[in-house]
Image (cartoon, rainbow, N blue to C red):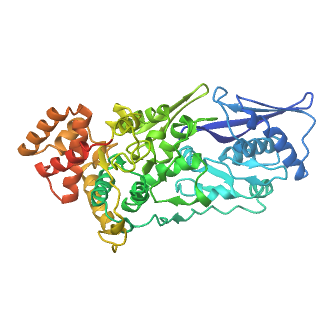
Amino acid sequence: MIARSFTVAFEGLEARMVEVQCAVTPGLPAFSIVGLPDKAVSEARDRVRTALGAMSIALPSKRITINLSPADLPKVGAHFDLPIALALMAALEILPAEEIADTVALGELSLDGVLHPVIGALPAALSAAAEGRALLCPRACGREAAWVGAARVLAANSLAEVVRHFTGQTLLADAQPGEVHVAEDSGDLLDVKGQERAKRAMEIAAAGRHHLLMTGPPGSGKSMLAARLPGLLPPLSASEALETSMVHSLAGLLDEGGISRVRPFRRPHHTASVPSIIGGGKGAKPGEVSLAHNGVLFLDELPEFPRSVLETLRQPIETGDIVVSRANAHCRYPARFLLVAAANPCRCGYMADPNQACARAPKCGADYIGRISGPLMDRFDIRIDVPAVAFHDLDLPASGETSAQVGARVAQARAVQSKRFEGMPGLRVNADAEGETLEQIAAPDSDGRVLLTRAADKFGLTARGYHRVLRVARTIADLDGADAVERIHIAEALGYRLTHTG
């Protein structure tokens, strides 16, 4: 008799169905696992044998063969423990084979039979729902998987609970979805003294998801401004929350199974490696660009990042996804993020202050900012100088608008864009528009076109730069409640595009 259970193997965000076949046949006692398992899967035989022994279930003196089908698909991870144990107990006629075959299972077994949490419960639940099967997982993963309402999710603490469920002794209750996480306090925009132009630039960047580069001396408030950007962004929509949570599920970042409606804010250190930024490592896991999907990727001290790391950002900025290619894995992850970067004008940071600048100024500034390649610099829609704040301004009372006030305008502009791109797959905000669509929604009036043409000729705008000015101008018009892109919108967009940065 060959018994079957089902689990999944992950290829990027896709959870591919894997059939776990178990045969118990006469022959010399042996327990083998075939089907391209990695080391963690191969070691499952010892965990399964010991966990069954803890339940007083002795394996027969026969040859036990576990086959993971399809055989040419790499199997990675300890979540194969539970489906292997289920298939084995079905082959031994301890559990009903028909019910086991109707369940997708994943979970890591401890030696005493306790089920430990594993990554990927959310995409596994989606795959189970597509197959019309229930999902069985550890208790700690149940709240996460239960967000997929189309699939029945059973969560157990131990292998003993699983056995009692399938034998009809004590049925497992359906898992309930975890809580929706609320936004953490990221500070208020009102806390930032001065820097009104930078605040306006952040509002435009948030409204249209335009990439932003801030350049200024140390202590001018660049990091402080960036940290308040999440407070300006609207909550994730239901579809965006599911996309983002699937990536975070594969990275093991979902806290207590809760789905977050808060947009991610990732700020990797400048010593980060290429795999940590774009993804990779064992199993080609998602990197920072994917963990920031639908949110913000903040790169502080941008010129300090290795050149090889910075150049990898060019492709996901344009396409909105990243393909991680390794010898045994080829995975595609979403990576549609708002890039915010901060940089000092030079190595010492005080190039504009003759009393503190080094002897190499201003050449040191050109050398320092020159670490950022021209093609990457061209991908920043908005570039602003953030000057130092005078000491006497720090003693002034708070002024300006709160994050809630600015966020309300951003949400209104985002709503206009959602209606504009309704029925256009892949388009959500102005930054996504290109080609004919961009020409239709951002065509400037006659005065605006004349201004844009003159600026393009005088300052040598690239075709990419020309189109990015149009996108920013469209967003400025949305914030102003204007139907058409006018000269004043083009002028402001050009002001952000042509700002001196070092």
Q: Name the residue rendered at 70%, 28% in the picture.
A: 36
Q: Name the residue rendered at 22%, 40% in the picture.
A: 437
Image quarter of residue 279:
top right
Using the image, determine if residue 92 lies above or below residue 480: above
Q: Return the x and y of residue 285 as percentages of the image width and height.
A: 58, 39
The answer to whether residue 340 of the structure is visible from this angle is no
Marks counted in the figure total 0
Name the image quarter holding the C terminus: top left
Q: Is residue 471 left or right of residue 390?
A: left
Q: Is residue 44 left or right of residue 183?
A: right
Q: Name the residue rendered at 61%, 35% in the picture.
A: 281
Extreme-bottom residue of the structure:
397
Q: Is residue 239 left or right of residue 142?
A: left
The answer to whether residue 135 of the structure is visible from this angle is yes
Extreme-left residue of the structure:
446
Using the image, determine if residue 150 lies above or below residue 13: below
- Front position in the image: 347 or 455: 347
Q: Return the x and y of residue 85 as percentages of the image width and height.
A: 78, 44
Q: Is residue 65 left or right of residue 69?
A: right
- Front position in the image: 37 or 448: 448
Using the image, determine if residue 68 lies above or below residue 257: above
Name the image quarter holding the N terminus: top right
Q: Return the x and y of residue 123 as percentages of the image width and height.
A: 56, 46
Q: Return the x and y of residue 196 as percentages of the image width and height.
A: 28, 61
